[in-house]
Image (cartoon, helix red, strand yellow):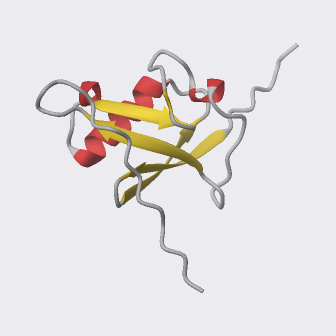
Amino acid sequence: MSQNLIVEDAYMMIQRKKKTIYINTKKCSPVNELKKMVGCIIKTSPENLQLYYKNVIMDGKKMLSDYFDSSLCIDPVSIGLALKMDNGEFEPLDIVPFPVQL
């Protein structure tokens, strides 16, 4: 008997200050894999990145599915990004909200 495995996509919006990066990967991907992807895009080592979901630091050993159930491309999951500073500590999480136009 064979089982069909459904591998769901995860759509994420990585935010730091005024920068936003849209990434999609598989929900079964480890957080460390997402850090590698972001690091390649911003040309920074994954060890110098800290990712946040709902203002909580994401554990690199966990899977993305440990943090959220689903995401849609029209409503991506918001992930915060902080970088390591010269003193070895991570900067505070700083996300500038999108301006609202009326």
Near-viewer residue (29 or 56): 56
Near-viewer residue (44 or 2): 44
Image point (65%, 61%), residue name: 74
Above or below: residue 98 compared with residue 71 = below
Query: How far across and down, in percent of the image, does residue 100 sit?
Result: 54, 76
The number of numbered discs placed on residues in the rendered structure image is 0
Query: How far across and down, in percent of the image, does residue 72 sit?
Result: 68, 52
Query: How far across and down, in percent of the image, does residue 27 sit?
Result: 61, 33
Query: How far across and down, in percent of the image, does residue 101 sit?
Result: 55, 82
Near-viewer residue (16 or 94): 94
**Left or right: 12 with respect to 16?**
right
Above or below: residue 33 compared with residue 21 = above
- Looking at the rendered image, the quarter that the C terminus falls into is bottom right
- Looking at the rendered image, the quarter that the N terminus falls into is top right
Image point (66%, 34%), residue name: 68
Q: Farthest residue to the left: give it.
A: 86
Image point (27%, 30%), residue name: 90
**Left or right: 66 with respect to 14?**
right
Image point (44%, 20%), residue name: 60
**Left or right: 99 with respect to 90?**
right
